Amino acid sequence: MQISELRTNVIVRGPVLPEPVQVIRVVPMGVSVKLVGRGLTTGMVHQPILSAAQLASLEASPETQPFDGDPKNFKLGVEALRLGIPTSTTPTSRCPSRALTRCRTNWKLSTTTS
């Protein structure tokens, strides 16, 4: 990776960084570069000073994400959202169909009172 490739909002990964980092600011410091970025996992701000060799070991994510997923799975997911099909993690999916209205009401009450 070159210094010119480091721009704001680019996500950078590498052995020098403890987690993937979203670049906030790049400050040139002679032959080195100070990278100010926010960790995607922890949200902590990282400010390493990187030499040219360390900078070469980093890899950046593409600016636009590729849309190379399976179109059949995408269509199934969109249909499930459209129809309101519950997943296995929703509380209403464990209720029998006759008691579904009562379970939804109890679930809404429990989530609003917490």
Image (cartoon, grey):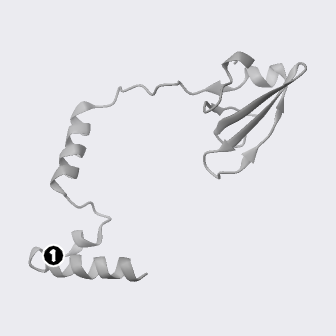
Q: Would residue 85 appear left or right of 57 to someone viewing this image? A: left
Horizontal placement of 20 versus 75: left or right?
A: right
* Quadrant of the rendering where the C terminus is positioned: bottom left
At horizontal 65% and vertical 33% (from top left) the residue drawn is 13
Instruction: Classify 48 as above or below 44.
Output: above
Q: How packed is label 1: few (under 14 Cα within 10 Å), some, or many (20 or more)? A: some
The quarter of the picture where residue 23 lies is top right
Across and down, in percent, residue 81 comes to: 23, 51
**Which residue matches tag 1?**
100
**Quadrant, the N terminus:** top right
Q: Position of residue 18 (x, y in %)?
A: 72, 43
- Percent x, y of residue 35: 77, 33
User: Residue at horizontal 41%, vertical 25%?
Assistant: 66
* In this view, 103 is above or below 90: below
| Circle 1: residue type | Leu
Q: Is there any visible trace of residue 36 in the rendered image?
A: yes
State the residue at coordinates (24%, 31%).
71
